[in-house]
């Protein structure tokens, strides 16, 4: 279903004010989605997910549905949006004797190194009772967001939503997810050093590209070094990604094979940036590596 901004007839305060009223209850990505829509007018979930670095297109669709229910967006076919459903909450009083509630309260405060408010406790219990998360998974998530420096229950709820998208349901699933996340962090730190930048300066697209090199293409440290040697000073993740993709298309999977192949010409690097409007010559169109790969790669970015 498509959406568009509700017309506000020159009233430049009403629409932003609606967003302000949802600051306390919406997560960070949902708020960023609203600001993106207000700035660009774009409500396509694919481009929104790419522009904001959201974990999936589904996450963008959920944000659109949220703001449609809140009244910021309307169905492109006209008509008023459906009213937002009232959020369900667990009854804290009736759960006073549930030992898991006490564990969630005590352990989350120990992990965060600070007390939590009644509203935050309510949200933790809702994650347990309404959303169906097991207490051990919630606490693993608390530990992870604390490690990342985000000691809030809102951050926990946001990461749990991402975990559910990735198929995490049990403690074992969470451990595997965390192990993979740690491995990706290590790869990004290593690659950042090769490119001469700080790991924190890597964009979400660059992080995904580096993970893809290792997980899907089997590219390691030495192969990245070799690609950097062929980059002719264009030492960016996006440019090196094009070199690695070109090598993969040619069946080049080792440093030795890359060295035998010689220097890649610029026209034979698989571009991951948007191409210009200039079309290749007819003879070049027959070259496997002059095809319009960029459109396909934009879908992955």
Image (cartoon, rainbow, N blue to C red):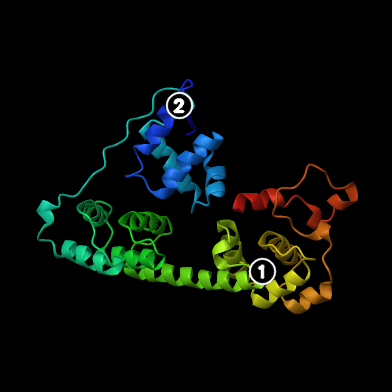
Asked if residue 268 lies left or right of residue 57, the reply is right
Task: Judge the density around disc 2: few (<14), some (14-19), many (≥20) Cα neighbours within 10 Å.
Answer: some
Q: Dot 1 lies on which element?
A: helix
Q: Dot 2 lies on which element?
A: loop
Asked if residue 31 lies left or right of residue 140, the reply is right
Q: Which mark is residue 195?
A: 1
Is the Cβ of the residue at disc 1 closer than 8 Å to that at disc 2? Answer: no
User: Percent x, y for residue 61?
Assistant: 46, 42
Total of numbered circles in the picture?
A: 2
Whether residue 200 is situated above or below residue 52 in the rendered picture: below
CA separation in Å, label 1 and label 2: 45 Å
User: Percent x, y for residue 222?
Assistant: 68, 77
Residue 43 in sight: no
| Residue at numbered disc 2 | 6
User: Percent x, y for residue 175?
Assistant: 38, 71
Of residues 180 and 11, the one nearer the viewer is: 11
Q: Which mark is residue 260?
A: none
Residue 174 in sight: yes
Whether residue 300 is situated above or below residue 244 in the rendered picture: above
Task: Judge the density around disc 1: few (<14), some (14-19), many (≥20) Cα neighbours within 10 Å.
Answer: some
Of residues 169 and 243, the one nearer the viewer is: 243
The structure residue drawn at horizontal position 26% and vertical position 42%, both measured from the top left corner, is 87
Q: Earlier in the sequence, mark 1 or mark 2?
A: 2
């Amino acid at each position: 279903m498509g959406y568009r901004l509700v017309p506000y007839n020159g009233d430049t305060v009403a629409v932003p004010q609606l967003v302000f009223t949802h600051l306390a209850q919406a997560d960070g990505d949902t708020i960023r989605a609203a600001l993106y829509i207000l700035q660009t007018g774009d409500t396509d979930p694919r481009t929104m997910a790419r522009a904001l670095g959201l974990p999936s297109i589904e996450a963008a669709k959920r944000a659109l549905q949220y703001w449609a229910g809140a009244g910021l967006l309307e169905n492109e076919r006209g008509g008023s949006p459906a009213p937002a459903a009232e959020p369900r909450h667990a009854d804290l009083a009736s759960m006073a004797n549930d030992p898991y509630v006490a564990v969630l309260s005590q352990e989350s405060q120990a992990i965060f190194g600070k007390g939590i408010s009644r509203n935050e406790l309510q949200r933790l219990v809702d994650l347990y009772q309404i959303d169906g998360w097991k207490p051990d998974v919630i606490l693993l998530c608390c530990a992870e967001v604390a490690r990342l420096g985000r000691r809030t229950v809102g951050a926990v709820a946001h990461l749990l939503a991402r975990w559910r998208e990735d198929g995490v349901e049990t403690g074992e699933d969470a451990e595997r997810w965390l192990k993979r996340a740690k491995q990706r962090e290590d790869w990004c730190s290593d690659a950042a050093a090769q490119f001469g930048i700080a790991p924190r300066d890597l964009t979400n697209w660059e992080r995904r590209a580096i993970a893809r090199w290792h997980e899907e293409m089997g590219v390691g440290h030495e192969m990245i070094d070799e690609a950097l040697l062929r980059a002719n000073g264009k030492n960016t993740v996006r440019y090196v990604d094009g070199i690695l993709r070109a090598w993969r298309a040619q069946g080049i999977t080792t440093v030795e094979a890359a060295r035998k192949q010689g220097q890649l010409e610029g026209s034979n690097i698989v571009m991951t940036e948007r191409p210009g409007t200039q079309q290749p010559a007819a003879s070049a169109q027959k070259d496997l590596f002059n095809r319009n790969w960029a459109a396909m790669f934009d879908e992955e970015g």
